[in-house]
Image (cartoon, grey):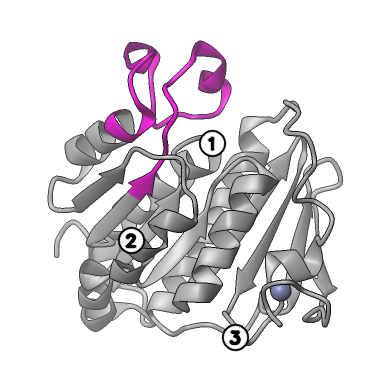
Amino acid sequence: MERYNRNILIKEIGTKGQNILLKSKILVAGAGGLGSTVITSLACMGVGSIGIIDDDSVELSNLNRQYIHNIKSISKFKTDSAQEWVEKFNPDIEINTYRLRFDHSYSALLSYYDLVIDCFDSYKSKFVLNDACIKKNKILIHGGVSEFYGQVLKVIPNKTACLRCLFPDKENLPNEIKGVISPSISTIGSIQSMEALKHILKLEEKALENTLLFFNGLKQSYKKIQIHKNKKCLICN
Ligand SMILES: [Zn+2]
């Protein structure tokens, strides 16, 4: 508990909340840029069990942002490299790694977790994850980043708008490589982690339900955009 003293001093957390965090289980989909911030934040907060899905290996060009990996991680699987970081930082945390390209056949692995955080980097993977969360009735905290911009959305299955409601035409976009800068990823990953904390401790004020938070790093602005379930959504209806 000494380790988590500064968490516990927050009245909304306290010893009771810390114990809830230590018993919580969160699945992080993607161990790249967003995953680096989300996994390290969850490990700092003392989330007791973290699952990590990724099928990629670390490349040199990842290291402008994916700080959970390092120069010695190059060519290692990102799941292994992320696991090593967590084990060194906080050995009390249970880590489950899933070295696989997520598709519908893996939906069952969501059942073990309290919620899922979308740190994937392509819309194709994000949609598959979105669909699996709705099917398995798991809360999804979506995050996406490009260049100086980013967005976060919380999806409550069958209750609030999902990713497909919002972007019905993005699924088949070609996965072109775009530039991205570390501070915008860290900002979005931190907001996702805060949403996860609030959900686990039931501290939320429905801030990002049916609401897309859009971040513009150039203007340093956050915009909340009201959205609704799409009656034509292939998944929600
Ligand atoms: Zn939908």
Classify mark 1: residues with Cα within 10 Å, few (<14), some (14-19) or many (20+).
Answer: many
Quarter of the figure with residue 197: bottom left
Q: Is residue 198 visible?
A: yes
Q: Quadrant of ligand 1?
A: bottom right
Q: Is residue 126 left or right of residue 43?
A: right
**Mark 1, mark 2: which one is toward the viewer?**
2
- What amino acid is found at the position of numbered circle 2 in the picture? Leu
Decide which of tag 1 and tag 2 comes sooner along the chain.
Answer: 1
Q: Whole-Å distance between the Cαs marked 1 and 3? A: 27 Å
179 in relation to 60, above or below: below
Residue labelled with disc 1: 33
180 in relation to 16, above or below: above
Q: What label does residue 205 carry, if any?
A: 3
Q: What label does residue 109 carry, if any?
A: 2
Q: Whole-Å distance between the Cαs marked 3 and 2? A: 29 Å
Range of residues picked out in magenta: 52-80
Q: Residue at x 36, y 74 (%)?
A: 10
| Mark 2, secondary structure of its residue | helix
103 in relation to 13, above or below: above
Percent x, y of residue 57: 42, 22
